[in-house]
Image (cartoon, helix red, strand yellow):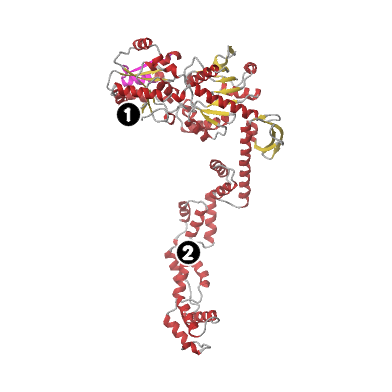
Amino acid sequence: MRIGLFSDTYAPEINGVVSSILTLQKELEKNGHEVFIITNRKGFLTTQRDGNVLRLPGLELKWLYGYKLSTPYHFSARDEIRKMNLDVIHVHTEFGVGMFARIVAKYLNIPVVSTYHTMYEDYTHYINRFDIEEVDIISKKFVTTFSRMISDNVQGVIAPSEKTKETLLKYGVKTPIYTIPTGLELEKFDPTQLDQERVRKLREELGFGKEDRIIVYIGRIAPEKSIEIPIEGFRYVDDPHTKLMIVGGGPQLEELKQLVQQYGLQQQVYFTGVKPREDVPYYYAMSDAFVSASLSETQGMTFIEALASHLPVFARPDDVLDQLVLEGKSGYFFQTPQEFAMKIQTFLNLSEKERVAIRSQARAMVKPYDGNMFYTKVMSVYYQAIEDFEDSYEVTKIKAAEDTMRIYVINDKEDEPIKITISLDDYFLLKIQKHTLLDRNTVEELRHKEQLLHAYRSCIRKLSVRDYTTKEMRRYLASLHVLKNEEMDQLLHELIHRGYLNDYQYMMSKIEKMHHSYQSKGKIIKALVEKGIPHDDVANALAQFSDEDESVKAMRVAEKLKLSVKDKALSTKRRAIAQKLMGQGFEYRIATHASEEVDLADEDDSAALRKAMEKAKRAHMRKLHGAQLKQKVIQTCIRKGFQSGDVLAMMEEMEWENEEMDQ
């Protein structure tokens, strides 16, 4: 296979991305594949090619640790890459060369795989130089949008760790994501394979004695690495023979040197500056432990290099270290400078046998990062990406439809073209025109987005008929069975943002209507809570109505309830009205007051009792006669709240057809 590795950074530079690329390149070539490196260089004008390495002109950004940024397009380089006849492009950067890679891939119809090496959220301080909160928010939002856009424009994304994959999923990336830890040439860092005389001389050259014990940091000297934490930790290290060695260069180097002077640690903290990559294993080999307080790693290659060098790792807790650092076995975790110093002392106080056990465990932790295993997993992604790309669809027809575009796509596996309605944003983002090729994942994603679009429009149609709460619309969307929870959240957020959904306005409108229809506060609260409005919000909105307002409503309702409590004793009527009021949500105090105040003087108890008895007699006289009928009438009237003495007295006054009932 002919493979193009595109990156803004490459040897002789030293960083985790370069380590990953070099390991992959070596393993690919070892297995018979031809590898081409497309990177950049310092210079404005010409493209340079040295064997299979093509270097594009770029601008060096000294404020960003010498990062070289090239323009997104180079005509002469495009023609060179055409001659390479690549089967797949593997992008290792997002800007500059990375943008160029994506443009060339589209132009030459080559499948693309990308590795997301950098947690850009942790690097926004390079833009936000004055630590302005608004700038920080905007820059992090840009990272989210940009990362999602570039990741959804390839056939597959490689995440070096689960932490990175979870971040990309949080950003909303839809492209298949494969978690593949970056491989390492483990044997290159094995101290037993190194020249021990060279290790000894290196210690002497740096001024370290045999009794000195060295804690090493290797990597970029930059704010996101939090190197100031272990430096401050050495303020609490009492042993003068315990040293901190910082290997590397970067934009924060001079600042940290001044910090060391400020703390008076010149005899304990050493800066070596940038060293050749081939010498790095020797700096690990001359050390007793490794430290890094960085939380910005997608995988942390220096952690893996240190463990491969038999060094225990001191680090702050981070997801990328879950499978690397076991507390007290392959390293130690710390949060503060003081805790770092304490853990260093704990380690150095161990017996030689105990330290050997930790070094052995450290080496064992990196077995999964073997370069050949890394190669095998990456190749499987290449093959999958090529297969997905070969299933690409060709755009055969395009039609404008209201505020969307309708495209027709087909591939060799389809009998008929597939019609897809897409947004204008996607139409222009994908630069769709007739005969454009869209890979299978892109088509599947566009079809799913079409479902989102239909769901959104369906919501608009429902909301144009009557108002709904957010909870009601969520229930409706769930009934469609096409959206995930996060997609429903996104769609509802859009409806709210555009003013189609407004739970507050819905609540206030309903309260107004229900109040004027004399419904109680309790009933209003219950009804709106069932619609998804928070109880406290409804209660606070109802605070504008006084108890006097509630009492007036209760009296109005009680007047209507009079008709439902006929032919009962007066006390029973009032009790029944109170119970009905409470059933409608009025408070006990207000309900009982209204039942006592309502005018029930349209008839006295005597007339009510006579009516009740006549009604009961008519109801039961077909089935009962004589004493049985009389007893049933008495029971019925007593249940209606009439006194038994009054019932019996009224019974004597009434005329009955069958006198034998008195017997």
User: Which residue is tagged 1?
Assistant: 339
The N terminus - image quarter: top right
Res 592 quadrant in image: bottom left
Q: Amino acid at mark 1?
A: Glu
- Left or right: where 268 falls relative to 516: left
Percent position (x, y) of residue 43?
Answer: 55, 14
Query: Residue 460 or 602: which is nearer the viewer?
Result: 460
Q: Earlier in the sequence, mark 1 or mark 2?
A: 1
User: Which stretch appears magenta?
Assistant: 255-275
Name above or below for residue 399 compared with residue 511.
above
Report, in whole angstroms, how far the alpha carbon at label 1 lies from the one at label 2.
63 Å
Percent position (x, y) of residue 107?
Answer: 65, 23
Helix or strand or loop: what does disc 1 sit on? Answer: helix
User: Which residue is tagged 2?
Assistant: 583
Query: Residue 233 or 165: which is nearer the viewer?
Result: 165
- Disc sitting over residue 353 in the figure: none
Res 85 quadrant in image: top right
Percent position (x, y) of residue 599?
Answer: 48, 73
Percent position (x, y) of residue 302?
Answer: 43, 22
* Mark 1 or mark 2, whichever is nearer to me: 1
Q: Amino acid at mark 2?
A: Gly
Q: Residue at x 69, y 39 (%)?
A: 401
Name above or below for residue 600 compared with residue 487.
below
